[in-house]
Image (cartoon, grey):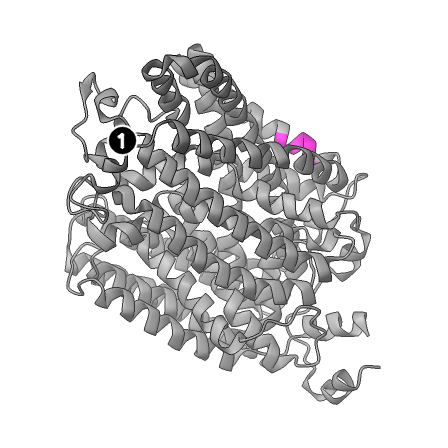
Amino acid sequence: MNQGYQNSRDKETGIAPDKGIVYDKELRKVLSRWELLYLSLGGVIGSGWLFAALYAASYAGAAAILSWIIGGLLMLTIGLAYAEISSAIPKSGGIVRYAHYTHGGVAGFLMAWAYLLSAATTAPTEALASTNYLTYLVPQISQSQIVYYSVVILFMIFYGLLNYLGVKVLGTASHLTGWWKLIVPAVTGFILVSTYFNALNLTAGGGFIPTTGTAPYVGWTAILYAIPAAGIVFSYSGFRQSIEYAGEGRNPQRDIPFAVVGTLLIALLLYALLQTAFIGALDWSRITVSGVAVTPGNWTALPNSNIASSPYASIITYIAEIKPLLAPILGIIIIVLLIDAVISPMGTGWIYTGTTTRSLYGLAANGYLPEMFMKLGKTKVPTLSLIVGLIIGGLFLLPFPTWQAIVTYEGSATVLTYMMGGIGLEALRRTAPELNRPFKLKGASIIAPIATAAAGLVVYWAGFATLSMVVVSVFAGLPLFLGYYGHKMLGLSEARANALGWGSAIVIALSLWYLYSATNGLSAPNDVAFWTFIVALSAAVGLGLLFMYRAVRPEAKLEIKAGLWLPAYMITMLIISYYGPFGLNTVIPFPWDTLLVAAVTVVFHYIAVAVAIRTKAIDEIIRSIV
């Protein structure tokens, strides 16, 4: 037996077990290094490359290039942290399970619930993107909402069927389409730069860092806001796919770091090229809104312009008119683009359908959902999780019917969960020093808090309206947590669990409704309504956890204490967001708001590391390895 593990046996607890160990062994371990890489690349190169450059430019002008670089570097720190964790603990649905391993049920559930909501929104996002480009070829689709959304749903059904065939089929399909998905955007970027590049566009709007023409901010605030709002985070967050499928890899300890880091570096270079090419290829005289030419530098007009539904195809079309000698070649490129505009989001859609499936599997493995969500079908895929994931994704089409609305929410909810990368890395080094780490990150004591701060900043930059919706939707999962995990795993009586859960949810919903009404849809300041919302939210969550703490078994109290930092952090972020330049009542100006958020997040990072616990899940994992 490993000596380090033997010396730590006194740390063992009966809290937060891993209920998925048996099912983990039944999963097919068939994915190669390159299949894992292309699962991540397939998650990164989807609808984001088709639309994000346009939206990023509308928010930040030419400086959107900086938005992609900053966003990519921030995500790289998060990816490095997860590379160590996932190579040491390769689990399918890993990201929803790691917080459970380090902090138990409260923090684990809130993070897992947030991640599930973010993962489930991606398949409909990609289905919407494919359908949008399909209307370019078949305009009749857009003439009826019934027909339009029927096509969206058919795409999602196809994603489900491909996943049901098994992870090997999924991995092979993602690998085969991966080369296509990588080559087409790269070639598109090079063609635009080499055939039509107007350097004057780099200073349109009052300079490279714009002083006019962007919405809803200008200058550096606009650059940072674009990172979550334009789909930049949404695009980069695909790196997580190799982590989510790690339990089905042949040699995940070696291959996951390669896939995670390789994907983020490729993505950073590709998206910086595409944004540069898009900026330079704009011909303002040919960009119109309702038939009227857009004034050069009026970046905010782009989402409502004639090129918005198919940006790259529209741009190449008018370049072919300007340069007729290139028209035959560009005509072929347009056809390839239109084909790719359907295929590329499809590839990402079926990958994220599998991610949602593994997220539900991971929730069940943590004990947050019944065991039936882990049961594998004939193809060794958790069938019920696959079906339920598709249904949840379809429901998100109701409140978020557009690509941009979904990606803003999805990106913010995802990155909130990424806080556990840096925190989990340092927490596991403290609570489980003997854990075998095939990839041990150098400089972890520096990179880990930076990764946590990066996640916190990206969530903050999304703005108060988005952040408030993310926080409320995360807390809306409390009835499930209290009613199932609190009752089944922590010993809370069923009646009390339901009363606390639904009581908290009703108070939170009513307080949000009041805030939404009093602030004109979260767009106008109202300090009285805001503080009423904060007090009600804090009371609903805090009192719920307090009553739970008093009623559960003594050993279960550790899980509650280890998770209190997370709701405290989310509420603190809401307060700073409301009073910052991304909120409704700017009291804290830029850049002091960003520095404050970074500092506060780092403080919570160290609090979270300090309160991390040695869970039964970690003991079970180490025991299964030695």
Q: Dividing the picture into quarters, in which one does residue 444 lie?
A: bottom right
Q: Residue 409: percent from the left, percent from the top?
A: 40, 46
Q: Is residue 460 left or right of residue 254?
A: left
Q: Name the residue furthest top.
A: 140
Q: Amino acid at mark 1?
A: Leu
Between 420 and 199, which is closer to the camera in this rendering?
A: 199
Q: Identify the main secondary structure in magenta.
A: helix
The residue depicted at 62 percent of the width and 37 percent of the height is 178
Residue pointed to by mark 1: 302
Number of on-image labels: 1
The residue depicted at 57 percent of the width and 37 percent of the height is 182
Between 465 and 407, which is closer to the camera in this rendering?
A: 407
Q: Secondary structure at mark 1?
A: helix
Between 192 and 427, which is closer to the camera in this rendering?
A: 192
Residue 59 lies in the magenta stretch: no
Looking at the image, is 288 positioned above or below residue 447?
A: above
Q: Name the residue furthest right.
A: 1
Looking at the image, is 137 positioned above or below residue 431?
A: above
Q: Residue 557: percent from the left, percent from the top?
A: 55, 78
Looking at the image, is 586 positioned above or below residue 443?
A: above
Span colored in magenta = 159-163
Q: Residue 6: percent from the left, percent from the top?
A: 78, 86
